[in-house]
Image: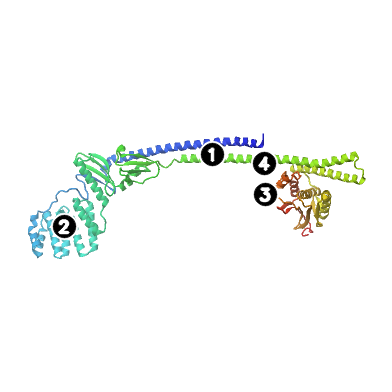
Amino acid sequence: MSRSRLIGVLAVVICLPAFAVAWLGFRLLAQDSAFERQRLIESRDMAADHAVQALSAILSDPKLFSVRPAEGAILARFPGSTLIYNESVPPLPEAPPDAFREGEALEFQGGNAAPPTEIYRRHASSPDSAIRAGALYRLGRTAAKAGRVQEALQAFSELSRMESSAAAGWPAPIAGIWSRCRIFSTTGQSQKLREEALKLREMLLSGRYPITRASYLAFAEDAARWSGTPRPAGLELLTDTVISVAAGVQKGALAPSGRALLSNTTEPVTAVWERGSESVAVFAARRAYVEREWLPRAGTGVWLRDNNGTIIGSVYSGEVSVRHSSDSRLPWSVVAVAPKKDQDFGSRRRLLIVMLSAVGFLTVAGAYIVFRALRRELVLARMQEDFVAAVSHEFRTPLTTLRQIIESLEDGRVTNEEKRMAYYHSLGRAAQRLHRLVEDLLDFRRMQSDALVYHRAPINVREFTGQLVSDFQREVGERGFEILAADGPDIDVVADPNALNRALWNLLDNAVKYSGKERRVELRTLCRDRVVEWSVRDFGDGIPAEEQPLVFQKFYRGYAARRGGIRGTGIGLSMVEQIVSAHGGRVTLDSELGEGSVFTISLPCGGEACIKS
């Protein structure tokens, strides 16, 4: 099976389970979402039904018509209810007009206020409360006209304390307080005016004194203007509602019992009424009361609305369930959203997503690791194939040389002793080269298995380097190469001479291979900071930056070597790095395209002489 086909099969084997898991996870998420939507619909419906039941129980509770409600609602029973005003009121007990005819004739026709005042003062002592109330009202009026303010205030004060009497068609307390307010308003006594106006307002709101709506509005408007306190619009709205509903029931325009949301110009009012054998009970509530007292008992996420779109309560976002008033027999339509989402759904879905993500991540990571390992193995296999081919080529060259020389010597074609000696030298160099190849392969195998033993001994750097240059010059001299090397420092370094020789020989051999048209190689040896450095420089094309981190890997050969057909096994630099590392040193590369390359071996040196050279 080819490499590409193997990778394809492996990709299918790995990806198919991943796709199956992803599809299954997607189906589970979709099923879970559908189940959650169904649960939300059921939850909304249950919330709406519970709200309808709770509100119906509230409106059907007998306590609704027996317990006085909190602020924002009123309970009225007709007849006999106590309201701030009524549609009609029975006549108040008041003195007949003829009782004050003489005094009023003198008051309105004569210019002297003394005679009528005496007459009114005399009537103010009458045992009849109706006559006394009428006389006090007229006495105060006459005294005010005459400029006797204190006397007028006193008369109206006495009038305001007559609870069951009337004056000028109004309840005596209201007429007395209102008249005092007029005097304070005329005389500019603002503080007293406000105090009396607040008393008048409280008296009107108490409902103790039956008056009509027109009379209430007149007095309430004056009280609001004098006290600076606005009229109770909400209470007036509720009073109008209960009066209107009671009148409708009594006239037959409304059913004996019922519930309705009555709209007007200001706000809707919820009304509930019930007709008994002798009376009609009406309960009326404003929007704020419904929101405060009833809606919390209906549950969260619930609000009300009428047919005109008027909203009672807070509107919540989301899909809703509606129970219309025609079906629920409530005054409003009930609207409900689903309660807060079930956390089990969210946590389960998150767990499922996390698990699927983990499976996907592990699958992708595993596939990446497998593909990377496979790629490395394929690359290594290709490099090994190249290595075998290169080794075969490296062996073929000296073997071919050996065979040709041996054949020439056997056939007797070499008759000159000098040429015979040259052939012997060539035969020795080929055998030596073959020996080095075999030793390199064996040592490389020992290095890979950590079985190579280094025999360290003191080495004189100058002598060692000179001998190395001399031997290598003989190797490459006949090809026209020149090794440029100065004398090294005269110091000792502890190392394995054979291993160090092999490492520097590989660097020199590579420099010769990659020198291109140049026929010179430089070897510099110096000592500084207790480190001995051997630098081998060629003047070839250099090594690209992207290949430089790879040149020390085993079996690796650069693009230029493969393209130019330069012989080599790909293990030389790897062996150099391992030898230098085993000696506690390091090997570095400095190369630029077009400028050649410099490989430097650095080994530690402990002698005092190895400080500077």
Q: Which mark is residue 356?
A: 1
Left or right: residue 210 compared with residue 440: left
First in sequence: mark 1 vs mark 4:
1
Numbered label attached to residue 546 = 3
Q: Which residue is mark 4?
A: 376
For marks 2 and 3 on the same chain, the one whose residue lies earlier in the sequence: 2
Name the residue type under label 4: Arg
The quadrant in which the N terminus is found is top right
Element under disc 2: helix
Question: Which of the image's four quarters has the C terminus?
Answer: bottom right
Question: Which of marks 1 and 2 precedes in the sequence?
Answer: 2
**Discs 2, 4 touching: Cβ within 8 Å:** no
Residue depth check, mark 2 versus mark 1: number of the one nearer the observer:
1
Q: Position of residue 421 (x, y in %)?
A: 90, 45
Above or below — where is 275 with respect to 548?
Answer: above
Q: Mark 2 or mark 3, which is nearer to you?
A: 3
Judge depth for marks 2 and 4 and give the one in front.
4
How far apart marks 2 and 4 lie (CA) works out to 115 Å
Residue 198 visible within the image:
no
Q: How much space separates mark 4 and mark 3, taking CA atoms?
A: 18 Å
Q: In the shown orientation, is residue 113 left or right of residue 464?
A: left
Which residue, given by chain and number where applicable, does mark 2 sit on? 159
The residue tagged with tag 3: helix, strand or loop? loop
In percent of width and height, residue 296 lies at 35, 44
Q: Badges 3 and 1: C-beta atoms under 8 Å apart?
A: no
Find residue 391 and report its horizontal and vertical position in percent: 77, 41
